[in-house]
Each structure stands twice: as structure tokens, then as C-alpha cells.
Amino acid sequence: MLSTTSCLANVNCREKMPTAMDEEERKLQRLKAAVHYTVGRLCQSIGEDHQKEFSRQVIAAIAETTFRQCDIFAKDLEAFARHAKRSTVSVEDVKLTARRSTALSNFIQRKSEEIASANQEQRDTRKKIAGKRKNKDTEMV
Amino acid sequence: MAESSAEITFKNETVSKLLSSFFKEEKTKVGADAVILMAEMLHVFVQGIQTLTLCCSEAAQRTIKQAEAEDCDRLDIEHFEKILPQLLLDF
């Protein structure tokens, strides 16, 4: 993002490749807006719980911090996956980013188990449906 | 708005695109389950900041009240120390 700002100041640079930079910038802005939206709703909700209000400045600051934290997360995740000689970030990589706090680690571990069991349930349900169909077909013959 | 903060989450698509935009290499992707888990991480992250912010504002407010009760113009560490035990219990 630093390079984009310095490029905007230098008109020549802008003229050379306008479209690619703008598209990238717009995409980033949309993502920032999406983060800001969810952070705003979370702030409103937790504010109501404590009968307090988060100012627009604070919400913007938290959104910006979260956005930047994603950058750190992403770089770490990419490094972990690469270390394991994978190009796809896995659940194990995510667990590693939570390693510094025991409470967070435990929380993420529980969540990953919930996701795994939910997937298993889906697979079992699909098997049941497929099994029933098979029986129907053989009966009709 | 009666939505509990537990129900408000970052959309999986947003999380996925967000992470992808920060990857240094184009070939790096994020698995479906990893996206869901990262959404949880971000959720906890935001809640953490919010709790700290509320905690700080509450600490500041109570310290001011303490100083006022003692008819002091300056906020000193003693005022903060006096309100700290209850603050920690409350949070």
C-alpha cells in the first residue's frame, strides 16, 4: 500500500500501469469495507451488553487493526504451509497461529473439533441417502 | 438489535479473499476448514480488543470517580490502585 501512495504522487508511474493498480486498490478497499462493517456490528452488539457506545473513531481504529492483523496472519499461514511443503493452508497451520496463548489455543482446538465432527456428520448423512437410493433401485429391478 | 455478538461473524468468503490478498505467492490457497477456523480467530481478536477498550475506559472512569471522591485534582497511581481489585473482579 505504501508503494501505491508514492505512485499516486508520481504521475508518470500512474500513467504507465493505471488499470492493474486501481483494480487491486479497489479490491482492497472493498475488503476493508467488509471488515469495517462486521467490526461495526460486533462493537454495537458488545456495546449494548455493557450499556456503552463505541465511537466511530474507535470502530474505525479496531477495523484498521484487524485488517492489519490479517496481513500478519496471512504471512504466517503462508510460511507454515510452505514449511510443510504445501500450497494450501490447512487447519494445522491455523492452530499454529494460536500457539502463543493457552486459552486461545484451547479455544481454537475445540472449534476445529466442532468443524471436524460437523463434516463427519455431513458425510454420514450423505452415505445414508446414497444407501437408501441404492436399495430403492435394486427393489425396483 | 438483539443479536448476540456470538452470532455476528466474518463471512467465509471475506476471510478467504482477505487472506489471499496478503499472500506473497499466487499459488497459496486456503482450505475450506482453515477459512472457517480463521473466521473464529478474527472473531476472538476483535472481541479481545473490544474487551480491552471497555476495560480501559472503565478503569479510567472509575479512577476519575475515586479521585473526585477524595477531592483530588490530580489522578495518581494510588487512585488507580484503589479501583483495580474491583475492576479485575468485574471483568
Image: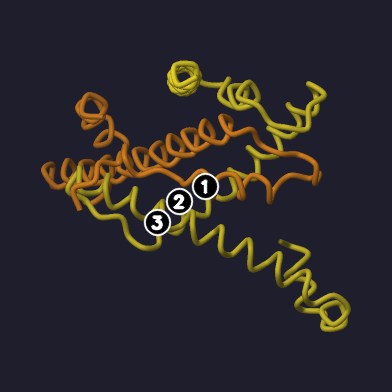
Q: Are marks 1 and 2 on the same chain?
A: yes
Looking at the image, which residue is at 45% across and 57% down? A36
User: Residue A54, percent across and down?
Assistant: 30, 55
Colour applied to chain A: yellow
For the residue carrying disc 3, how many other residues have a C-alpha within 10 Å: few (<14), some (14-19), or many (20+)?
many
Residue B29 image-quadrant placement:
top right
Q: Examine the rendered structure and indicate whether residue A138 appears above or below residue B57.
A: above
Q: Are marks 3 and 2 in contact (CB under 8 Å)?
A: yes
Q: Measure the C-alpha gap from mark 3 to mark 2.
A: 5 Å
Chain corresponding to orange in the figure: B
User: Residue B38, percent across and down?
Assistant: 54, 35
First of labels 3, 1 by sequence position: 3
**Left or right: residue B71 compared with residue A135:** left
Q: Amino acid at mark 3?
A: Ile
Q: Chain of mark 2?
A: A
Q: Which mark is residue A62?
A: 2
Closer-to-camera residue (B27/A134): A134
Q: Tell me the SS state at disc 1.
A: helix
**Left or right: residue A45 compared with residue A126:** left
Which residue position holds label 1? A66
Q: What coloring was used for the rendering?
A: by chain
Looking at the image, which residue is at 58% across and 31% down? B34
Q: Are marks 3 and 1 on the same chain?
A: yes
Looking at the image, which residue is at 23% across and 41% down? B63
Q: Amino acid at mark 1?
A: Thr
Q: Chain of mark 1?
A: A
Q: Measure the C-alpha gap from mark 3 to mark 1.
A: 10 Å
Q: Amino acid at mark 2?
A: Ile
**Left or right: residue B8 compared with residue A74:** left
